[in-house]
Image (cartoon, coloured by chain):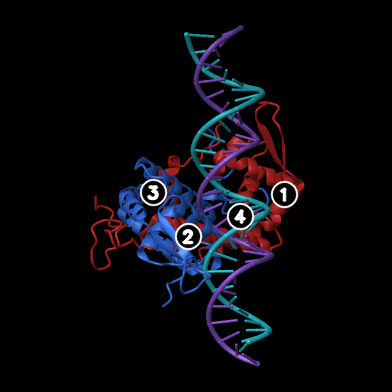
Chain colours: A red, B blue, C cyan, D purple
Amino acid sequence: MLTISILVNDRASGPVSLLEEENSVKDNNDMPGHLARRFQQIAVAVFLAEVEDAGFDLTPVQYAALATIKANPRLDQVTLAGLIAFDRTTITGVIDRLVQKGLVERRASSRDRRARELEITDEGRRTLRKVTPAVESAQRIMLRGLSAKEGEELMRLLRKAIAAGNDLSRAPLRDMQA
Amino acid sequence: MLTISILVNDRASGPVSLLEEENSVKDNNDMPGHLARRFQQIAVAVFLAEVEDAGFDLTPVQYAALATIKANPRLDQVTLAGLIAFDRTTITGVIDRLVQKGLVERRASSRDRRARELEITDEGRRTLRKVTPAVESAQRIMLRGLSAKEGEELMRLLRKAIAAGNDLSRAPLRDMQA
DNA sequence: TACTGATAGTCAGCATACTGATCAATCTCA
DNA sequence: TGAGATTGATCAGTATGCTGACTATCAGTA
């Protein structure tokens, strides 16, 4: 199926297949999967560097969780996972570390004894406020090769591709239900 | 369904800063770092599903390594890492698993006793050939929400952003020297 | 040649992510 | 109501990725 001329590196020779034949390997730069990995790799590195420069020890994942917990009081872990598209088994460890750092409290829910209620602490609130400029800065830096318009377009296309693929990962994004 | 007005920065009020102030949290969908994570998450899931459906047990990272080893006979690990932008400490484990599966041979280099020479096996060659359609298919599926033109544009913008950020991660892409 | 610095590879340790399993609590519906 | 299904959380196991440390080796030079 030679559709996808997008994926084909037909610079000159006009190959027939995405991965060309026997003796050639497709250029990584034409594989969206590889580009996704590289961009994510850089994004994480930039985030960690900016946040550390600001004097904090917080990963991108921990930041997203913390911000979402602050915005949604008494959130349970499964709902949190849905809001930021984390696997529920990953959340356990992330929350462990946020609790350990004193940024979040985890307590039993009164409504559902299976569930845990998450609440941001004052310290968590303070950290979130103070780390924000570094996070903003990181978002800018990871797009520094693009014009403002290109950055917008990249985000639009990513959103669109993600929306179409949302259900393909184990941890799809989910709305809050009522 | 209340949706997520919580996470939405209401466009109407005209936010001042990227992350707005105290009581609001930026919509994840406006954070390139978050979009990068999501897209990569989906890309990996799609890759694994397609490859498994085809009857193979190979991760995206293992596939990239295997293809690059095939294309570059007697490659050493550091050069391999540079070609696919992996950290050198990650390569060790990846190669371990490829060797374990009988797809790659690792032997001492005659030229430099510190280095290891990597060589694809016949089995590796066979696997690579047979898994290729699944890999192609995965690349298509992860862009299924986009038109051909949009997919092309997404890859162009990712390449551009990555090029500008290449040196920001511990594992930048490197050319083969000599 | 002996010293110095750089390099290839590995390892320990940590933090995502995922699969698949388990346990307890809750829900559904006959 | 009560059996079966579902759900919230956790755990064990595996695979990236990273930091930082370490060994062995190499290359250049005083």
Which of the marked residues, 3 or 4, is nearer the chain's N terminus? 4
Specify whether residue B9 is in view.
no
Q: How many marks?
A: 4
The residue indicated by pointer 2 is A38
- Which mark identifies residue B142? 3
Pointer 3 chain: B
Q: CA distance from mark 1 to mark 2?
A: 32 Å
Looking at the image, do the residues carrying marks 3 and 2 touch, with CB atoms under 8 Å apart? Answer: no
In the rendered image, the vertical position of residue B110 relative to residue A45, given as above or below = below
Badge 3 marks a residue whose secondary structure is loop
User: Residue A31 appears in which quarter of the rendering?
Assistant: bottom left
Q: Do the residues at discs 3 and 2 belong to one chain?
A: no
Q: Position of residue B29 (x, y in %)?
A: 51, 50
Q: CA distance from mark 4 to mark 2?
A: 25 Å
Which of the marked residues, 1 or 2, is nearer the chain's N terminus? 2
The residue indicated by pointer 1 is A125
Looking at the rendered structure, the kind of residue marked 2 is Arg
Q: CA distance from mark 1 to mark 4?
A: 14 Å
Q: Is residue B113 left or right of residue A127?
A: left
Badge 2 marks a residue whose secondary structure is helix
Pointer 4 chain: B
Looking at the image, do the residues carrying marks 3 and 1 touch, with CB atoms under 8 Å apart? Answer: no
